[in-house]
Amino acid sequence: MEAARTFEGAIEQVGVQAAEEAQLVAELQAGSDDAFAYVLERYRNPIYSVVAQILISEADAADVLQNVFVKVFRGIGQFHGQSSLKTWLYRIAVREALNFRRGWFRRHFHEPFSIDDEPLEPAADLARAPAGSGPYETLEQSERQQLVKAALETLPRTYRAVLVLREMEEMPYEEIAETLGVPEGTVKSRLMRGRELLRRKLSIALGR
């Protein structure tokens, strides 16, 4: 009985959230300045974080972030609720970051690669230093994070985006699939391949 009440409560909460989002979208589509200010305040920092991790440049991320919200405000009339508002916002952000990144890569990198399927370790674990809080451990962890950041920068954009969304933003597979507009199986495949490519690049950088 208690489990049933908990389940009913969760369903009710989802319904309330859906109704609140529908109201917010209606206000956005009506041109409400307050609604736009609310969306900007709520999503600016998390979207900036995703874009910055894809681009590895705060300056570029700031430019892309501005473009993202311009497109959100101009395109909200075409939002019909096929996904959550958050997923729609992230989809625009990732697309803008990847399009920006694609032009940069054409000017700087062209790296062929091949990948074998084998056991992998999460990308987030690759940056994790052994337990410890002393200055040497802190320095080591910082150096590891910089290595991961540099290696991540060279990954093909499709793998990079999945790694950022899964390992750093901790999005569920289903939400990543909706954000990128690809099947969930594709997300898992790209994540596996991206982790392996990142691991190999880090192994080379560490001389292992």
Image (tube, grey):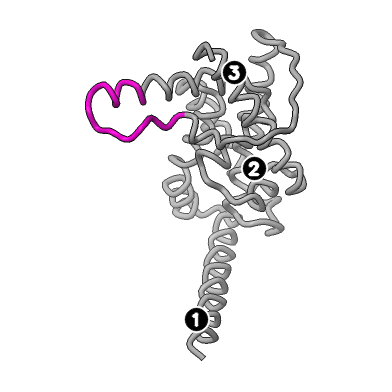
Q: Residue beneath label 2, please?
A: 91
Give the Cα separation between the discs numbered 1 and 2.
Answer: 32 Å
Residue at point 57%, 13% (across, down): 204
Residue situated in front as seen by the camera: 76 or 64: 64
Magenta-drawn segment: 127-141
Q: Is residue 33 magenta?
A: no
Give the Cα separation between the discs numbered 1 and 3.
Answer: 47 Å
Give the Cα separation between the discs numbered 2 and 3.
Answer: 28 Å
Q: Residue beneath label 3, please?
A: 201
In the image, residue 55 lies at what x, y percent?
A: 55, 24
Q: Amino acid at mark 3?
A: Lys
Q: Which mark lies nearer to you, 2 or 3? A: 3
Q: Amino acid at mark 1?
A: Thr
Left or right: where does residue 65 sit relative to residue 141? right
In the image, residue 27 lies at what x, y percent?
A: 55, 59
The disc, 1 or 3, on the residue closer to the chain's N-terminal end is 1
Numbered marks: total:
3
* Residue extending furthest toward the bottom: 1
Q: Secondary structure at mark 3?
A: helix
